Amino acid sequence: MTLTLDLARKLADLCLDRAAGMNLKPLTVAVLDASGHLKVLLRQDGTSLLRSEIAQGKARGAIGMGLGSRALYTRAQEQPFFIQAMNTIAGGSLVPVPGGVLIRKDGEIIGAVGITGDTSDNDEACAVAAIEALGLQADAG
């Protein structure tokens, strides 16, 4: 299964629907395919300047390392030099904090959702809820 544009749009919309139900701050949602290419980017009104890069960085880190960004956050605490090296290799584009969630179908990674704008835990909760609402597996790490 590949991550189609239609599926990516549905995921992004579901993330924002969940955020509205939780009364969260304005979010930015990035959906990347399994190759790390951007499929959809949605920015709610009122988001700050760097949110697009942060959302993509959370998702890119998950895709690049094959781990949800919560696991990358833990690894950054335990092995900061390793994550620093990976971020250097990635041109500084990884954001190792919760909110980057792998999308799996039958165990296979088909993409990732990255969200930023509220707390990292709330960002992650929106991604997980959206992914699971479509019958896919969310891997937050």
Image (cartoon, rainbow, N blue to C red):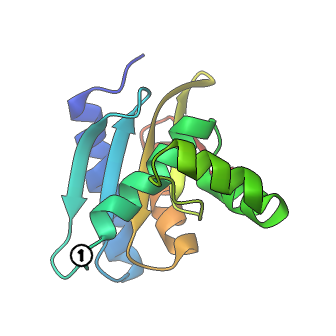
Residue at 48% x, 35% y is 135
Q: Residue furthest right?
A: 78
Q: Quadrant of residue 15?
A: bottom left
Q: Secondary structure at mark 1?
A: loop
Q: Is residue 46 above or below residue 5?
A: below
Q: Is residue 40 visible?
A: yes
Q: How many marks?
A: 1
Quarter of the image where the N terminus is located: top left
Residue at 58% x, 72% y is 121
Report x, y in % for residue 132: 51, 45
The foreground one among 60 and 135 is 60
Q: Is residue 12 above or below residue 43?
A: above
Report x, y in % for residue 34: 44, 28
Q: Quadrant of residue 64?
A: top right
Residue at 53% x, 64% y is 125
Amino acid tagged 1: Leu
Q: Is residue 130 visible?
A: no
The foreground one among 78 and 19 is 78
Q: Residue furthest top?
A: 1
The foreground one among 20 and 66 is 66
Report x, y in % for residue 43: 21, 65
Residue at 26% x, 54% y is 13
126 with respect to 4 (left or right): right
15 with respect to 48 (left or right): right
Q: Which residue is mark 1?
A: 49
